[in-house]
Image: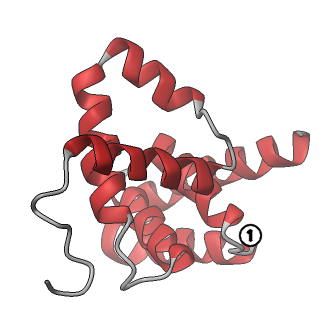
């Protein structure tokens, strides 16, 4: 089996369990409220996110955690998805990414996505940083 390949015989439950473990590690919270709410209200979606997006994709090791999270922040910034910038920006900070690197992603957003998306990203990053300072 190729490096980082998921065993095709592995159960969805095993992938979900791995996804839950990874989410807890990334967030620093053993029971992230966002996933609990998603699981309660939209269980099929929660399962897909946890078992596939996290349990398979984020479980890969070709990129380290900090690089993967910065890449996700950049993608979400280009798409204008502030809530996801906050989630994955928080994961990036938890993985040791300095605030300056998150801010650099905002500046880079001007190239592929333009100033309006960079401004949206700057607001999301500013809110994330303010919320972490308030704790």
* 31 up-or-down from 51: above or below: above
Residue 70 falls left or right of residue 59? right
Q: Residue at x 38, y 66 (%)?
A: 59
Q: Which of these two is toward me, 9 or 32?
A: 9
The answer, for residue 120, to whether it is visible in the render is: no
The quarter holding residue 48 reads top left
* 14 up-or-down from 37: above or below: below
Judging from the image, what secondary structure is the residue with disc 1 in?
helix
Q: Which of these two is toward me, 52 or 2?
A: 2
Q: Residue at x 25, y 30 (%)?
A: 45
Q: Mark 1 highlights which residue?
A: 99
* 102 up-or-down from 4: above or below: above
Across and down, in percent, residue 75 comes to: 36, 64
* 72 up-or-down from 71: above or below: above
Q: Residue at x 30, y 50 (%)?
A: 15
The answer, for residue 100, to whether it is visible in the render is: yes
10 Å crowding of disc 1: few (<14), some (14-19), many (20+): some
Q: Which of these two is toward me, 99 or 120?
A: 99
Across and down, in percent, residue 4 comes to: 27, 79
Across and down, in percent, residue 91 comes to: 60, 58
């Amino acid at each position: 089996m190729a490096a980082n390949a998921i065993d095709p015989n592995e159960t969805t439950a095993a992938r979900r369990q791995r996804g839950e473990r990874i989410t807890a590690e990334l967030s620093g919270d053993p029971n992230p409220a966002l996933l609990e709410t998603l699981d309660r209200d939209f269980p099929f979606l929660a399962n897909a996110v946890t078992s596939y997006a996290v349990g398979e994709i984020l479980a890969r090791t070709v990129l380290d955690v900090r690089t993967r999270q910065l890449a996700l922040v950049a993608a979400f910034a280009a798409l204008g998805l502030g809530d996801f910038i906050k989630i994955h920006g928080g994961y990036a900070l938890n993985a040791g990414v300095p605030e300056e690197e998150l801010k650099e992603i905002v500046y880079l957003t001007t190239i592929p996505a333009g100033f309006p998306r960079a401004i949206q990203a700057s607001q999301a990053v500013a809110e994330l940083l303010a919320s972490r300072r308030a704790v």
